[in-house]
Amino acid sequence: MKTLLISGSRNPQGQTAQAMDAVRKGLSNKGASTETVFLPPLKIERCRQCDEGGWGLCRKEGQCVIADDLSGLVEKIRQADAVVVATPVYYSDLSESLRAFLDRLRRLCTHETGRQSIKGKPLMGVCVAGGGGGGAPACCLSLEKIMSTCGFEVVDLIPVRRQNLQSKLPILELAGQGLAENR
């Protein structure tokens, strides 16, 4: 099983990375191969809302007119058997890099061509809150709404906070194992 892990965090050693590493360990323990993509270094512009109605080729053809790293990442998603999305939580919501990516992905997925090889694909989400940590559940809800709109089969959403990260690492590893076993 090939799993794509997408991180909305800039810090490859931070709390979100620790959580994602636990999921990766669980996947690997069950023989799954993994590839990790960190969104902040990629060039992914925000949606331009191309036409007067706020749409464009995304709605008509399931494609985007912006020539950046989006199409390559969407192709990686299509080639994967499952996807894991991990994000730090800012203001009870997704990171800005993940938000920019998902805003455009969901527009592509409004057209059946854009949903090709995405619809029904299993997805796990991990939302890691620093600070007080109270925003992780709200972030999970936001992630679930967007990913369901895109057509993914959201199989698990795990809120994590700075205060319980260490105790959640074994749970995240088990969740990764479960994702691999059920595919």
Image (tube, rainbow, N blue to C red):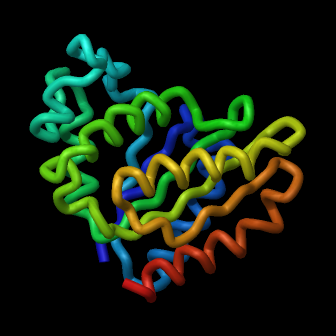
Name the side, left or right, on which 116 lies relative to 55: left
- Up-down relation of residue 170 to residue 103 (above or below): below
Q: Nearer the viewer, residue 80 or 24?
A: 80
Q: Which residue lies furthest to the top in this view?
A: 52
Q: Position of residue 38 (x, y in %)?
A: 43, 40
In-front residue for pair 42/75: 75
| Residue 12: % across, % down | 55, 41
Image location of residue 7, percent across then percent down: 49, 45
- Location of residue 171 in the rendering, given as x and y in whole percent from the top left corner: 70, 74
- Count every numbered label the image shows and give the total: 0
| Furthest residue toward front | 53
Q: Which residue is at a point 19% across and 21% down the rendered structure image? A: 66
- Residue 63 in view: yes
Quarter of the figure that contains the N terminus: bottom left
Query: Residue, x 35% and y 51% (percent of image)?
Result: 150
For the C terminus, give its image quadrant.
bottom left
Specify whether residue 34 is in view. Answer: no
Q: Residue at x 80, y 50 (%)?
A: 161
> 17 above or below 53?
below
Query: Left of 38 or right of it: where is 55?
Result: left
Identify which residue is drawn at 33% across, 25% down. Answer: 44
Q: In this view, does 75 lie to the left or right of 150?
A: left
